[in-house]
Amino acid sequence: MKQFLAFIKKEFYHVFRDRRTLLIMFGLPIVQIILFGFALTSEVKNITLKVIDNSRDVSSQQLINKIKSSSYFIVDDSSVDYNDLEKAFKKGTIRCALVFPAHFGDDLQHGGKAQLQILTDGSDPNTAKTVVNYLTAIVTAWQQEINAGQPFPYTIVPEARMLYNEEDNGSLNFIPGVITLILMIVCTALTSVSVVREKELGTMEILLVSPFKPLMVLIAKAVPYLILSIADFILILILSVYVLDVEIRGNILLLFLESTLFIITCLSLGLMISNVTNSQQTALLLSMMGMMIPTIIFTGFIFPLENMPLPFQFISNLIPSRWYFLIIKAVMLKGLGFSYVWKETLVLLGMTIILLGVALKNFKTRLS
């Protein structure tokens, strides 16, 4: 045990002496969680809205003021010709336009019906649909205000409620995925160079002639990164709660244990990569770039897995981050217990055992 602790101490020295490792371990997660936490959001805000008011009556002005009071649009109601709208869309100066027809107020008051034209930039269909929904909701709310106390036949007023996100915080949809992405890349990248670095530095001979068994060597190399990765996760969690206003609804201990299991899975994957490669550049390329794209695509926090073809859905089951994302979303956001995530936990545990077995099998005790 003394030899084992001495080996772990030696690995800690390696980590603390390497500034690049410390930068990847603590600098990269802080930048990613802050950058992705504020940049990745499903909300659409500050959209430039060009208004062409051909009516210029009380009703149109009331609706324009209603739109201005929202945080979604920056209203530009300066006079412009209708034919110049296409030029503005082509230049990208506006992304949405609202056109009031002549006699808008008269049609609404006397005919009981009026029309509006909404023009959006369809080159970004998701944003365009969101903008149309926002404008439709604002118009509906304004119509209900002006018709207060006047019953309409067959009026249906839907009342929506967002479960697990009552405050409509856009960060909640992406923070669990960002945490998954950070842990997957950082933990895998750091351990992926642990063994191959010994080969490049020529110190592998010392490890091979030591009384350590291959399993003990792998465990000793993983323990320092496990401890530092847990500290990294705690730091990420603190930033998520106090900087991005993400409320942890579930059990903290369960979230900590599940995250520790996922960290061990990532470390096992990194050890496997380190044992099957012969250079640090190759190991980093496989661990960082090779795992970043599958994590982003097949985890489900950006692109819905249900919309993918069945072969891609099958491939997603082989990505460890997909299962951890389901766990952290269920525990962190929904407040669910272990009885709801035990299947995903078993999958991660099975992957960890398989990855450690492959890493151990590929650990060469003889140098070629």
Image (spheres, grey):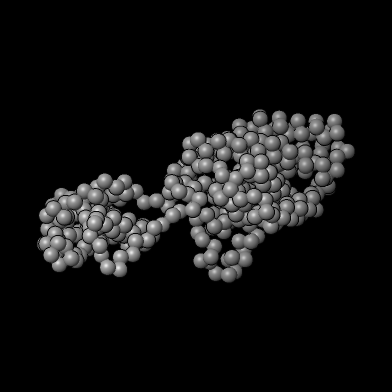
Instruction: Judge from the rendering whether residue 241 lies leftward or rightward of residue 5; answer left or right.
Output: left
Q: How many marks?
A: 0
Q: Residue at x 67, y 33 (%)?
A: 15
Tell me the quarter of the picture where residue 51 sits: bottom left
Instruction: Judge from the rendering whether residue 197 lies leftward or rightward of residue 145; answer left or right.
Output: right
Q: Residue at x 56, y 44 (%)?
A: 249
Q: Nearer the viewer, residue 20 or 128?
A: 128
Is 143 located above or below residue 287 in the figure? below
User: Where residue 218 sits: x, y (%)?
Assistant: 77, 43
Q: Residue at x 73, y 34 (%)?
A: 11
Task: Residue 183: tell me if it is visible.
Answer: yes
Tell me the quarter of the picture where residue 157 sits: bottom left
Is 321 located above or below residue 307 in the figure? above
Instruction: Judge from the rendering whether residue 295 lies leftward or rightward of residue 119; answer left or right.
Output: right
User: Where residue 329 sits: x, y (%)?
Assistant: 57, 51
Task: Residue 280: tell me if it is visible.
Answer: no
Q: Residue at x 88, y 38 (%)?
A: 211
User: Where residue 44 sits: x, y (%)?
Assistant: 36, 51
Quadrant in the picture for the N terminus:
top right
Q: Nearer the viewer, residue 311 or 275?
A: 311
User: Where residue 302 sits: x, y (%)?
Assistant: 50, 55
